[in-house]
Amino acid sequence: MHLSRRGLLYGTAGVGAVSLAGCGVGESPNQLTGYTGIAMPTTTSDRWVVEGADLEARLKDLGYKTILEYGEDDIPTQIQQIQAMVDKGVEFLIVGAIGNTSLGEVLGNAKDKGVTVISYDRLILDTPDVDYYASFDNYQVGVLQAKHIIKQLGLSSDTTETYNIELFSGSLDDNNSQYFFQGGLDTLETYIYGGSVVIPSGQTEQEPTATERWDRTIARDRMAELLDTYYKDEPLHAVLSPYDGISRGIVEALVEADYEPGTADFPVVTGQDAELLSLKAIKNNTGQTETVFKDTRLLAGVAVEMVKTIVDGSTPEVNDRGTYDNGFKFIPSFLLPPVDVTVENYQEVVVDSGYVTEDAIDNAPPDEG
Ligand code: GAL
């Protein structure tokens, strides 16, 4: 039973770990043993790189060994990496999934060996073998993005003008996408029904607005096509974008279509993740004007605390048991609050808190490709 105190569950030759199972009653070594496997989705986005290193450092501080791998947005690669971790004898898996329904078999193998599985940031679906979910209030992310648009356009119940908006959503096989999108859409809904917000493309569902693998160039190309098809004679006022990489693709297409960043005619573009390049654009008013910061330091802390708590023989603290149904069960979740970031508060939220430096923002290297 994976919630009870336990040490290495199976002989991991060469690990040199001490099994907690060998401890007598009353003895509390309070020391973690064995390995935790950390499977992150990609290095193309700042956050996962920072988090992988952060998770490793926190676990190592507790005396735990780690295996950290990046799947580089390729599902078979991530499955192989997780299988290798299971073969190596990990006790815990912290997984930021690439495809939300593709890990059933490998997690089944993990579960056969008693591994505890923590779904990290993204919920893994269609398998009974997920034990915990550490994430943010993903619906609220979309709410904050839509609220930024409402504020910037000055929308209210008295608005008589009509504003043109386009919607973007994330990868269809990332469970978070639907939460971001729904939060945004629900928040804009009264203005859409009231007629002050119009979506000229008519693309208001998740599928036509999706961006496979959250890819910037896919978003750029879709934005270029929308501009070409619907905005030859119409102004575009805002774009609901779920993630900074996508936002920068959108901005690129807007600039190519002669919209000028920093001017009143430049559409409001939202974002998420407080990536350096996006913070730079927010600071200098050269593109998107908002991002949603999810403090990944807190998230890494939650995941590591889950591991530690289980090793210490207790049950991890969760604060939500009824939101995230993965197709088999509601996964006990710990959800953190996302924070809206604009030019007014970026310094306080991400610089003063030590998440990034002003220097790193100023010197953020340009997007590749
Ligand atoms: C989502 C995640 C976002 C963003 C996106 C692209 O799953 O919640 O914060 O990172 O993936 O990587």
Image (tube, rainbow, N blue to C red):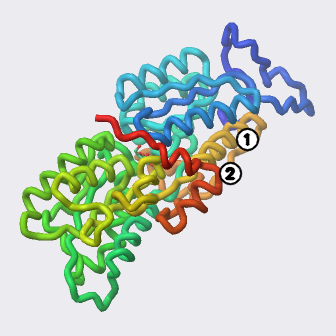
At 92% from the left and 33% from the top, the residue drawn is 26
Seen at 58% across and 15% down, the residue is 88
Residue 74 spot, x, y in % from top left: 35, 28
Horizontal side of residue 92 vs 315, given as left or right: left
Q: Which mark is residue 309?
A: 1
Where residue 361 appears, x then y in whole percent? 50, 48
Q: Look at label 2 and name its amino acid.
A: Glu
- Mark 2 touches mark 1? (CB < 8 Å): yes
Residue 63: mark in rendering: none
Residue 323 seen anywhere in this rendered image of the structure:
yes
Q: Quadrant of residue 216?
A: top left
Towards the viewer: 329 or 187: 187
**Residue that sits furthest to the bottom in the current view:** 158
Residue at 66% across / 16% down in the picture? 10
User: Does dot 2 land on a helix, a strand or a loop?
Assistant: loop
Badge 2 or badge 1: first in the primary sequence: 1
**Regarding mark 1 in the picture, which secondary structure is present there?**
helix
Three-letter amino acid code at the position of disc 1: Thr
- Report the side of 59 relative to 48 (left or right): right
User: In this view of the protein, can residue 142 be seen by the observer?
Assistant: no
Label 2 Cα neighbours within 10 Å, binned few <14 / some 14-19 / many ≥20? some
Residue with the mark numbered 2: 317
Q: In the drawing, does residue 352 fall left or right of residue 180? A: right
Q: Quadrant of residue 93?
A: top right
Above or below, comparing residue 17 to residue 150 in the picture: above
Query: Which of the two residues, 173 or 109, is positioned nearer the viewer here?
Result: 173
